[in-house]
Image (cartoon, helix red, strand yellow):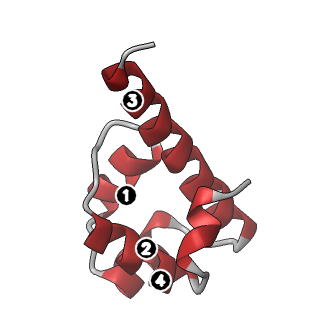
Amino acid sequence: MSVEERYSIEIIRFGKRLRQIREEKNLSQLDIELQSGINRTEISRIENGQKNIEFYTIIKLSEALGIKLSTLFTD
């Protein structure tokens, strides 16, 4: 597997984990937008594995969800 393929898989995995946590907390993408300042469209693209994100964005998402940063990377 190439680095690019592995990277793509991890982006998709991260997005699925983000959606799972958001839904477990009964939060909408709008709720996360209001808490984080990240546009709903961008949140949707992240959750669908269509967007590479910066570390700063990951921090903002974890704060909006009220979770430890590491939670976004564990199942």
- 3D distance between C-alphas at marks 1 and 3: 17 Å
Q: Amino acid at mark 3?
A: Ser
Tell me the element at label 4: helix
- 3D distance between C-alphas at marks 4 and 3: 25 Å
Residue 8 badge: 3
- 3D distance between C-alphas at marks 1 and 4: 12 Å
Which residue is label 2 attached to? Answer: 61
Q: Nearer the viewer, mark 1 or mark 2?
A: 2
Q: Amino acid at mark 1?
A: Ile
Which residue is label 1 attached to? Answer: 43
Q: Nearer the viewer, mark 3 or mark 2?
A: 3
Residue 11 badge: none
- 3D distance between C-alphas at marks 2 and 4: 5 Å
Q: Earlier in the sequence, mark 1 or mark 3?
A: 3
Q: Amino acid at mark 2?
A: Leu
Q: Residue at x 46, y 13 (%)?
A: 1
Q: How far across and how far down the image is residue 39, in percent?
A: 26, 66
Task: Assess whether mark 4 and mark 2 are in contact (beta carbons under 8 angstroms).
Answer: yes
Which residue is label 4 attached to? Answer: 64
Tell me the element at label 3: helix
Q: Amino acid at mark 4?
A: Ala
Q: Earlier in the sequence, mark 1 or mark 2?
A: 1
